[in-house]
Amino acid sequence: MDAATTPKVANVKLLINGQFVESRTTQWRDVVNPATQQVLARVPFATPDEVNAAVAAAKQAFKTWRKTPIGTRARIFLKLQQLIRDNMKELAALLTAEQGKTLPDAEGDVFRGLEVVEHAAAIGNLQLGELANNVASGVDTFTVLQPLGVCAGITPFNFPAMIPLWMFPMAIATGNTFVLKPSEQDPMVTMRLCDLALEAGIPPGVLNVVHGGEDVVNAICDHQDIKAISFVGSTRVGTHVYNRASLAGKRVQCMMGAKNHAIVMPDANKEQSINAILGASFGAAGQRCMAISVVLLVGEAQKWLPEFVEKAKALKVSGGATPGADLGPLISCAARERVESLIARGVQEGAKLELDGRNPSIAGFEKGNFVAPTIFSGVKPGMSIYDQEIFGPVLCVVAADDLEQAIEFINANPNGNGTAIFTQSGAAARMFQEDIDVGQVGINLPVPVPVPLFSFTGSRASKLGDLGPYGKQVVMFYTQTKTVTARWFDDSTLHHGVNTTISLK
């Protein structure tokens, strides 16, 4: 886009070495309110020199930050969590304007990230090594968990507060420095969070932000001074990042696409189950990697389909700031067109369109990227609406005869982000959690994303890398275990002569 033809709006800054700086790039992208098409700001695609400057600042800052007392680091995050709480309404409003989700959902986005900041404040308990006395005569062995150096994060548009907060607080708390590349579609709330992080006391160079697209992602993957990368986004990009960064010798974790299934047993609480599944399917307009996009109705529960449809019809679609709105717009015109295209293909490929959410009439938001709740029945593997992650408010309904068949159906899908079962039977729930091959399991809970005491544990095609974000696992991801084996001599120590064996004597 030619900068000269773009209406005058605020430019999103880069954060390099503690300063918010204007990019010198010639390539810009508009940040657009998806409910109105209003241009909110311009985001730069950082130049190679700017990416290098951000990494260089992080590398220099690491020399002192890695030796900063652990209590000092912890207190910064105690301060940051308070600042986030104090500014929750502002952050949510900013998030809704640029991303589209409803204000209550935007507050939830910020809050789930805030929980990770609180967890980071407990780093003194999380980054402990181990010690064993007398592993041999007079010999002790202990481990220390040391930071890696410069780490990087690449985050998606759908959670512009929560997912950056999954990454940089834990990376920095463990003693690393960080370069963040937020989504170029909605970077404003992320930048406000970084502003609060500086206010909380994060020193210059410890946290840096660059913006951009494919070129910036590749530069991060290739840069020799970056030691680890955390990624959340699509399967296509995540696979590229994992392969490219791994070949460059980096530690990588990639949380990627999904096709999350829920099973509804005939003994489930009908009202609670329907409400939970519709909320998980259509909340955030379906733009969650943990959205329930497929529901398997088992046996007599198949008769509940009309109630699913009637309740979905009653959900309110509007701008995210509209009181009482249940779901807002999709992130972009392109996203809306893709979802509408997949709905059309679902019809063409033989699924029954029980509820068509295309082209809703939303008073006051005629230009918005809206798709209303959409429900298909008779969905089968091989159909585009089943095989692809739609990332929109589309629920696919599948009939199953029994629990065993439903479990087999889910396990045949390559993705393994999340799944859920709704039942009053402890035996059915236990069988499900035991036999299902999916990383995160909900029992009468549709979106089983754990609190930060645990880690996000998506699996199979939904994840590349061994360790998940936040929780205990991310402490291992962002640290190197150094094992020290030591023996100390004094003047009275007997001399045993030369030991030419591998045995400790």
Image (tube, rainbow, N blue to C red):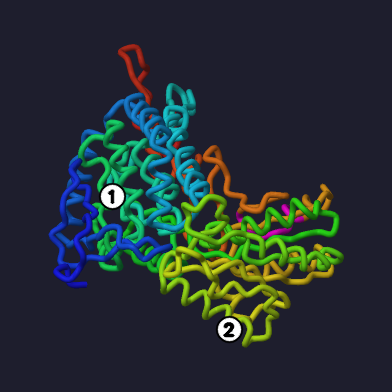
Which image quadrant for residue 381?
Answer: bottom right
Q: Is residue 449 above or below residue 495?
A: below
Position of 202 with respect to 353 (left or right) is: left
Q: Label 1, on which residue?
A: 179
Q: Disc 2 to disc 1, how far (Cα)?
A: 40 Å
Closer to the camera in the image, 319 or 286 = 319
Q: Residue furthest front?
A: 363
Question: Which residue is disc 2 drawn over?
Answer: 345
Residue 467, x across and y down, in percent: 48, 50
Q: Magenta residues?
A: 432-439
The stretch drawn in magenta includes residue 438: yes
Residue 27 percent location from the top left of the image: 19, 67
Please tell me how crowded label 2 is: few (under 14), some (14-19), or many (20+) other residues with Cα within 10 Å: some
Q: Give SS at disc 2.
A: helix
Looking at the figure, which quarter contains the C terminus? top left
Element type at marker 1?
A: strand
